[in-house]
């Protein structure tokens, strides 16, 4: 056995172990037999791979990956010109700062919320666009709000969620939180130069696009912007998604049906609302999957939308 191979991960012949040891397997089988009447079972999970816990130790190899990501980011932002890049961006430098920030975020587990993919693109969007106001609808544990707080030291940050029970306000210097739907907030009395809204609340994108336009917000990030034939990937996706509004003609009020993990789901769609939202969209850009290069995941069709006017 190689001297660096340590306890538990290899069997006595030097082969990598997979799964529980035989003794643990027996115990788990016994516990699962007891849990079965409750429709529960013990499942082996492992920590998500992140740049903080999984990386090459050689700095030269790490910087190769940063260069590849910079190439992807530059190509992707070129596709949304002139909406986002207004000046020359040093993508490698920005990505290195992003990794530094991401490694030091005070939270690790963000299951149910954004993964590496969203953090990566949203960091670059806000660093390049420099919005003076960020509105986040759907805060969850507040990890993306923390990124906004760190990446935009001079901007106002408003987080809205119908349940703020997972947020720890001491982690933020400037973000303020509101336990309500953003459409009930009074935005009057402020003149924002370049506001940005991030909708990650699974509410219908047509509604959110119309609401943003009514409040003078033309830069939008939409999460879970599933194409119509992939809506089944989420139990409660935003329906209609922006992608669906742009790529399918909705000729009447309809109902979208799919099955998610055995559960039948259906969502009404208003033709009039889809048509109104479609008319407002100028730019629609789905960010490419950074998991292909980095191995760190979380791709869920994050999209930049710019409204007309
Ligand atoms: C996917 S999580 C948000 C993840 C978070 N933005 C992140 O990046 O980690 C969705 C959140 O939307 C919230 N939500 C559901 N309906 C909402 C609404 N109408 N307005 C605001 N938030 C809502 C849920 O309570 C949940 O916390």
Image: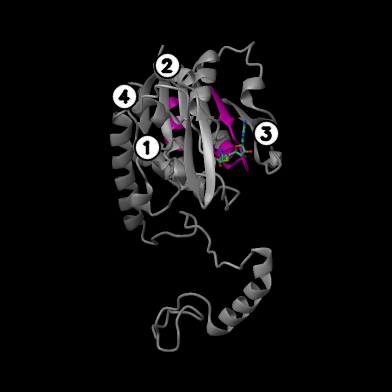
Residue 117 percent location from the top left of the image: 43, 44
Mark 1–mark 3 distance (CA, rounded to whole Å): 27 Å
Mark 3 Cβ and ligand 1 under 8 Å apart: yes
Give the image quadrant in which the ligand numbered 1 is located: top right
Label 4 vs 1, first from the N-terminus: 4
Neighbour tally class for label 2: few under 14, some 14-19, many 20 plus, Cα within 10 Å: some
Q: With 8 as the anchor, is 88 left or right in this view?
A: left
Residue name at image x 58 percent, y 84 percent: 23
* Earlier sequence position, callout 3 versus callout 4: 4
Region of the chain picked out in magenta, as a range:
123-147
Query: Distance from label 3 to label 4 (Cα)?
Result: 35 Å
Mark 2–mark 3 CB contact (< 8 Å): no
Q: Which dot marks residue 287? A: 1
Residue that mark 4 sits on: 81
Of circles 2 and 1, the one toward us is 2
Mark 1 vs 3, N-terminal side:
3
Question: In the rendered view, would you say 222 is above or below 53?
Answer: above
Q: Between residues 215 and 168, which one lies in front from this camera angle?
A: 215
Ranked by sequence position, the earlier of labels 2 and 1 is 2
Q: Earlier in the sequence, mark 2 or mark 3?
A: 3
């Amino acid at each position: 056995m190689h001297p660096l191979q340590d306890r538990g991960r290899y069997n006595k012949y030097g082969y990598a172990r997979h799964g529980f040891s035989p003794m643990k397997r027996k115990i788990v089988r016994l516990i699962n037999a007891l849990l079965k009447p409750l429709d529960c079972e013990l499942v082996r999970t492992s920590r998500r791979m992140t740049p903080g816990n999984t990386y090459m130790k050689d700095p030269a190899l790490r910087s190769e990956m940063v260069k590849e990501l910079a190439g992807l980011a530059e190509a992707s932002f070129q596709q949304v010109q002139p909406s986002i890049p207004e000046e020359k961006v040093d993508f490698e430098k920005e990505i290195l700062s992003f990794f530094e920030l991401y490694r030091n975020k005070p939270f690790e587990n963000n299951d149910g919320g954004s993964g590496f993919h969203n953090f990566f693109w949203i960091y670059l969007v806000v660093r390049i666009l420099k919005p003076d106001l960020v509105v986040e609808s759907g805060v969850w544990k507040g990890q993306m709000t923390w990124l906004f707080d760190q990446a935009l030291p001079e901007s106002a940050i408003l987080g809205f969620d119908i349940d703020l029970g997972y947020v720890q306000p001491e982690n933020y210097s400037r973000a303020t939180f509101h336990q309500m739907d953003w459409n009930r907030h009074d935005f009057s009395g402020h003149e924002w130069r370049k506001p940005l809204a991030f909708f990650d609340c699974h509410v219908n994108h047509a509604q959110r696009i119309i609401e943003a336009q009514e409040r003078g917000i033309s830069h939008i990030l939409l999460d879970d912007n599933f194409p119509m034939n992939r809506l089944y990937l989420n139990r409660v996706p935003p329906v209609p998604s922006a992608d669906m509004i742009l790529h399918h003609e909705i000729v009447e009020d309809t109902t979208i049906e799919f099955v998610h993990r055995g559960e039948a789901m259906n969502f009404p769609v208003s033709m009039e609302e889809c048509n109104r939202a479609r008319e407002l969209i100028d730019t629609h850009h789905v960010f490419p999957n950074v998991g292909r290069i980095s191995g760190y995941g979380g791709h869920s069709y994050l999209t930049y939308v710019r409204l007309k006017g």
